Image (cartoon, coloured by chain):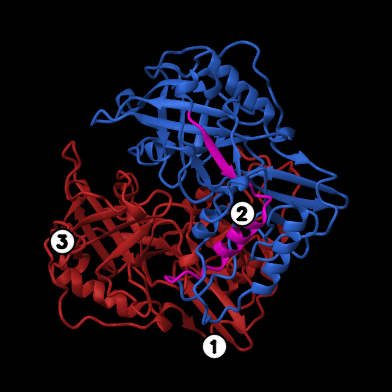
Chain colours: A red, B blue
């Protein structure tokens, strides 16, 4: 991979655009760059890392299925183990979508006690991770300085994914297909996954509570990055987020539904590996440590396809969505 | 105002937090800062600058009204005049919501010819603004350097609103209650309004078309800032965005509805000043050139209210929504 990355860095260095309008030759759009990439750039998501949530059918009787990808190590593994345990205990079967706050989050799980839910207890033996685990300290991830990070995502030094300046950290980048941010202090780097659209996090009460994973939410608006490092992120929705983002907004405080009738029932939640093989969904994500991803990220920051007159000259990490595709069985 | 701004700058300089967890005294949340501000910090929106859009009732027969605020000068005034002209010609009466693309935009107007719409022509005499008018060149807005812009929004020099670093420009800030971004080149500054959640823009075809204002969209996802300087922004939704953001997503390309039946009908669109006085909605926005707004922006970047353990240390302009409130008649 390394030789490709060097080639990508050179390519990007040559193509940094001016802020003025360009007389550009026809250039591929970001999506065209992805579409032209080889199959080897796509990484299959393990069935153990996919969680399938079946909602009650919509008013027209259509099936509604949401699929979540759990994050790979090193982030949030205590909560992620809990989520597998909760799914295997059928904890969420008969639970519901309880909160939909516009431009913020959709939250699900058993509703608050006394509000018409099943009052099902969580299974025994869940992990109880601490706040320190919201982030990961990484002395060895970066040996090069990242002070050269610019608004346009670029591959820098020995870090394999494009890196860019960030409003909330020293830099933002990607690791194993997920958006991350980082700060450097002396020889230590600290990284954390970030709250982009569709990311899934763990509801909690006030500190020191960190949540056990039984209450989950996903982002349905502008990235609420102030939640980074304050809440555990555990994954992202890879399919069906429209079944959550288009739900009626709750009219109670924080978008909580005021009546049980407004809640969308959750029929069942399963880890994909626990479903019969024929019923397992299959997804791949685009390898964020490839030359093609670096070209895609750069093109997101400087659109040159025909609709655009002025390339932006930058992009924030949440405006560079990692491509995900379904694999037909 | 100036003395207050100097006080705000001093206050912010004293309160810049460390990245480590703080043993903070109970601190007001951003919303508490706004709630405690005097009424003088709120600016009434002129009825001439409010556009009311009445959708068909929902399935339960509930009224659905969306209210848009048109942007004040100097931005996009050619298109904004067109929007008033189109509303007064009743152009949008009987039109529809034609496109809902998840994490992107909702678009409305007369549907494409031949797809079951009224094929109503636009009125005569509309302005035809050029691409140069997407941005405003401003030699006099800033006399101080903005190189001191930091991730935490701060009042800098003689610019009255908090200013911060930005992934897409030299800095971002606010002007007359709207989020803007800017680049400086020698003695010239160029500013433009930015595509935050709820902002309203003008649909167009390929350049040199700039749109006439008859096709409008609003952002319902993460800020698509790559559209900045490529499309005219004309205002923002100040009420009822949930009636747009919760609509079913279109399944055609770009989220366009594939059948006429999926479209949500628009009953009428009026400039509020053309409605009978008793039926006019009234809104105020928070003055972005006040000490209280500077405190609010700083608090958005560094949450210290009890839920938060780690202040973010920054915020991007679209995560600092300008407060808007309805005024009861």
The magenta segment: B281-307
Residue denoted by label 3: A114
Residue B301 located within the stretch drawn in magenta: yes
Disc 1 is attached to a residue of which chain? A
Q: Residues within 10 Å of mark 1 (few under 14, many from 20)?
A: some
Could you say whether the residue bearing mark 1 is in a helix, strand or loop? loop
Q: Is residue A26 left or right of residue B144?
A: left
User: How many numbered marks have been drawn onto this rendered protein structure?
Assistant: 3
**Can see residue A159?**
no
Q: Determine if marks 2 and 1 fall on one subunit.
A: yes
> Residue shown at 67%/60% (left/top)?
B164
Could you say whether the residue bearing mark 2 is in a helix, strand or loop? helix
Q: Does the residue at mark 2 contact the one at mark 1 (Cβ under 8 Å)?
A: no
Q: Determine if marks 1 and 3 fall on one subunit.
A: yes
Of callouts 2 and 3, which one flags the residue occurring earlier in the amino acid sequence? 3
Task: Work out whether residue B221 or residue A43 is closer to the camera in this orientation and state it.
Answer: B221
Q: Residues within 10 Å of mark 3 (few under 14, many from 20)?
A: few
What x and y, as percent, mark residue A195? 45, 63
Residue A270 bears which disc, if any?
Answer: none
Q: Is residue B195 above or below residue B313?
A: above
Q: Is residue B82 above or below residue A41?
A: above
What x and y, as percent, mark residue A234? 35, 70
**Can see residue B251?**
yes
Q: Does the residue at mark 2 contact the one at mark 3 (Cβ under 8 Å)?
A: no
Disc 2 is attached to a residue of which chain? A
Task: Work out how far the residue at label 2 is from the one at label 3, CA to CA, in angstroms.
Answer: 49 Å
Task: Work out whether residue B315 or residue A143 is closer to the camera in this orientation and state it.
Answer: B315
Residue denoted by label 2: A301
What x and y, as percent, mark residue A147? 69, 74
What x and y, as percent, mark residue A51? 25, 64
Residue A161 located within the stretch drawn in magenta: no
Residue denoted by label 1: A139
């Amino acid at each position: 991979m390394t030789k490709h990355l060097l080639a990508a860095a050179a390519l990007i260095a040559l193509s940094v655009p001016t802020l003025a309008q360009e007389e550009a030759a026809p250039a591929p759009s970001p999506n065209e760059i992805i579409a032209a990439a080889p199959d080897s750039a796509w990484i299959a998501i393990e069935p153990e890392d996919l969680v399938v949530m079946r909602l009650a059918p919509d008013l027209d009787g259509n099936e509604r299925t949401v699929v979540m990808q759990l994050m790979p190590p090193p982030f949030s593994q205590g909560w992620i183990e809990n989520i597998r345990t909760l799914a295997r205990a059928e904890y969420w079967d008969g639970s519901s979508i309880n909160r939909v706050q516009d431009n913020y989050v959709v939250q699900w799980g058993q509703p608050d006690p006394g509000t018409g839910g099943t009052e099902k207890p969580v299974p025994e033996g869940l992990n109880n991770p601490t706040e320190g685990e919201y982030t990961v300290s990484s002395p060895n991830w970066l040996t090069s300085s990242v002070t050269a990070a610019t608004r346009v995502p670029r591959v820098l030094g020995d870090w394999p994914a494009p890196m860019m300046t960030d409003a909330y950290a020293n830099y933002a980048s990607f690791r194993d297909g997920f958006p991350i941010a980082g700060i450097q202090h002396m020889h230590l780097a600290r990284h954390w996954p970030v709250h982009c659209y569709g990311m899934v996090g763990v509801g909690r009460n006030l500190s020191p509570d960190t949540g056990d994973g039984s209450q989950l939410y996903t982002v349905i608006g502008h990235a609420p990055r102030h939640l980074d490092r304050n809440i555990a992120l555990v994954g992202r929705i890879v399919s069906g987020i429209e079944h959550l983002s288009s739900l009626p907004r709750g009219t109670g405080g924080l978008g909580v539904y005021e009546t049980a009738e407004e809640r969308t029932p959750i029929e069942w939640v399963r880890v994909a590996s626990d479903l019969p093989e024929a019923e397992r969904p299959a997804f791949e994500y685009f390898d964020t440590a490839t030359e093609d991803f670096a070209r895609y990220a750069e093109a997101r920051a400087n659109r040159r396809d025909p609709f655009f007159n002025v390339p932006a000259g930058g992009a924030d990490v949440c405006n560079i969505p990692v491509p995900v595709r379904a694999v037909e069985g």
